[in-house]
Image (cartoon, rainbow, N blue to C red):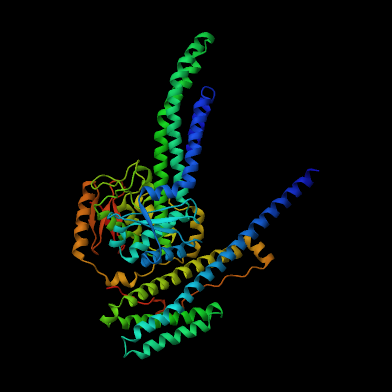
Amino acid sequence: MLAVYIVGGIVVILLIFFIATYNGLIGLRNQLRNAWAQIDVQLKRRYDLIPNLIETVKGYVKHERGTLEAVTKARNLAQSLSSGDVGARSKAEGELSSALSRLLAVAERYPDLKANQNFLALQEELTSTENKISFSRQYYNDSALNLNNKIQMFPSNVVAAMTGFKLGEFFEVKAAEEREAPKVKFT
Amino acid sequence: MLLVLGYFLGLYFFESAIGGLVIALLVWGIMSLVAYFQGDSLLLAVSRARKISRDDNPRLYNIVEEMKIASGLEKMPDIYIIDDPALNAFATGRDPNKASVAVTSGLLAKLSRDELQGVIGHEMAHVKNRDVLLMAMCAVMLGTIVILAWYATRVLFFSGMAGGRRSSKSGDGGGQVIILAVGIVLIILAPIMAQIIYFTISRKREYLADASSALYTRYPEGLASALEKIAASPVQLKSANQATAPMYTVNPFRQQGRAASNLTSTHPPIQERIRILRAMSGASLADYDRAYREARGAKAGIAPTSALALDKMSGAAALRAPSAEAKTAEESPQKIERARETSDLMWRLNDYRTIDCACGTRLRVSPEFRGDSVQCPHCGRTLSIE
């Protein structure tokens, strides 16, 4: 009789452990998905801001056609890849970031432009969006790390293997030059 | 600890003073409820904060949103501005989904974007760590213990006389006297102990919020230089009072030239916070923990061990470069120099020793610091103290 109780007790404890671990994994996975959605929101916001920026800047910087076009091109490419996988997308977004940074560096040379209220407001929006992208990426990567740790470490790896959890993919910035956020200057 | 003290007092007087205890518990209950449901709006009303929307101050709104994203909060907190030239900020709200962040207009005017980000990160950490609720509940508990002790003195006075009559009849006065003595000691000590514990918790949470802010922004220098500016500002916040003090980034009652580090301070000394932030080699909680232990010479760190264990494996929290603004906006160096000189003087007055490192860094050594050498946080040289 005692043996039955002991075995029963162990089974109950294992069951509770299983349920708790499984729910924990689900929570982490949802957190990761939510973090991904957050990056998405910010990247979309950047797509929306760029045409406005181009419109505002165009009148002032007549001799910088190439820079403007590069930004538009990078934006369109990134947008077309926005339903693609994490790797391709982070590369395209990195290129967009560096194209933008070149444009804003160019804009520095035009005092009239820097006095434009509209441009200043856009500049603040863009800086902030750029920050938000990197913060949401930071949070996404932290979430991916948490999930991956859970999936790979004992004892939760047993539960993860039984229920087929996949490792989260990190959102990495590829080349060194792409690490630089657009240089937005306030003067 | 608070609970035990409260419980012991309650237990001791339960027999003799049910009435008093019930009243005290009732007061505690009402205070808790008010603090829980109305605490944030009360606090905001008392500090005369006005709510702003995105269009009123896009920059502040953006920075708060950035920190909301970095901390992984689900809901955007409400943002308030206090029209006051003093430099300070606070966060309130009983749970992360119903939070508010308030900053003074002086803070908005004086701080750069990176610095403001550090301060907002600190406030968001308070929200995320549920410090607001913790501190509110601690404050209520503290209040209750004070009230309990006050009631206890009254009750003791009366029951002492009653007990005296009884013991003369039954003849076991010895036990009564001992219980009476223990009771008196407790009544005197409980409120003092409770306050010291309250302040200790408060200071711990401040350090933790600093650490979290560094983790969110990946740029501890932002908060460090913000704290430096705040420390150099002589203006005191008008609308703060003792009860709301623990909510602010820095203690609003800080007086220049007075030792800030003592048992009854809700905030750690600013210079120490700056030193810890500057000594960080990375931006993770583990890095802050290490810097904290080095600066304080303490064995115990500040962050919960479970968070640290996870953190060490990642090692991913590298520092980032300052934003473009910080590089270009080199604002009047003379002004900063003057502020530094003044604060140096202040720290010398408090027995802080200053050491100049060959790399140009000036270190301040707290009088509590034990040991005869210190490492320069910038270049890593080991410097001997005197």
In the image, residue B121 sits, relative to residue A177, either above or below, namely above
In the image, residue B46 sits, relative to residue B87, either above or below, namely above
Name the residue located 25 percent from the left edge and 69 percent from the top edge. Answer: B330
Q: Nearer the viewer, residue B43 or A173?
A: B43
Q: Nearer the viewer, residue B380 or A53?
A: A53
Kindly give the residue lying farthest to the right in the view shown. Answer: A1
Q: Position of residue B203 (x, y in %)?
A: 39, 47
In the image, residue B148 sits, relative to residue A112, either above or below, namely above
State left or right for residue A124 relative to residue B137: left
Q: Nearer the viewer, residue B327 or B17?
A: B17
Q: Position of residue B97 (x, y in %)?
A: 50, 56
Q: Position of residue A51 (x, y in %)?
A: 42, 82
Q: Is residue B1 visible?
A: no
Q: Nearer the viewer, residue A114 or B183?
A: A114
Name the residue located 45 percent from the left edge and 79 percent from the top edge. Answer: A94
Number of numbered markers: 0
